Amino acid sequence: MKTTIEIDDGKLARIMSLTGLKTRKEAVDWALTEAERIAAINRIAEEPWDAEFLKDAVEPGYDIIELRRKSVKYGRS
């Protein structure tokens, strides 16, 4: 989508320099992606998951201790 916006040239130049991005479009896309990632992290931090929410997160038969006891074959069979 094409949009016209005013962008702080100094800030954009610093972002491009720090990240090694070559175009303004790449820098703006990177900034939006980072803003989205940070917002998602902040949302999780504000609303931590409780036991009820996580009850279906792990398969009921999953047993990490049993997995650690199993022998592992390395190399070619």
Image (tube, rainbow, N blue to C red):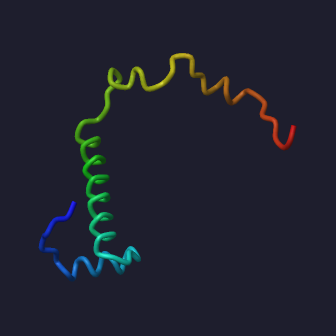
Kindly indicate the quadrant of the structure image that contains residue 9.
Answer: bottom left
Instruction: Report the quarter where the N terminus lies.
Output: bottom left
Percent of width and height locating residue 30:
33, 64
Seen in the picture, residue 24 relative to 35 is either above or below; the reply is below
Relative to 58, is 33 on the left or the right? left
Percent of width and height locating residue 61:
56, 17
Instruction: Report the quarter where the C terminus lies.
Output: top right
Relative to 72, is 38 on the left or the right? left
Residue sitting at 28 percent across and 46 percent down? 40
User: How many discs appear?
Assistant: 0
**Depth check, front residue: 61 or 14:** 14
Kindly indicate the quadrant of the structure image that contains residue 12.
Answer: bottom left
Seen in the picture, residue 71 relative to 17 is either above or below; the reply is above
**Depth check, front residue: 20 or 69:** 20
Percent of width and height locating residue 64:
61, 27
Residue sitting at 84 percent across and 43 percent down? 75
Percent of width and height locating residue 74:
82, 41
**Depth check, front residue: 29 or 72:** 29
**Depth check, front residue: 62 or 10:** 10
Seen in the picture, residue 51 relative to 28 is either above or below; the reply is above
Seen in the picture, residue 59 relative to 43 is either above or below; the reply is above
Residue pushed farthest right?
A: 77
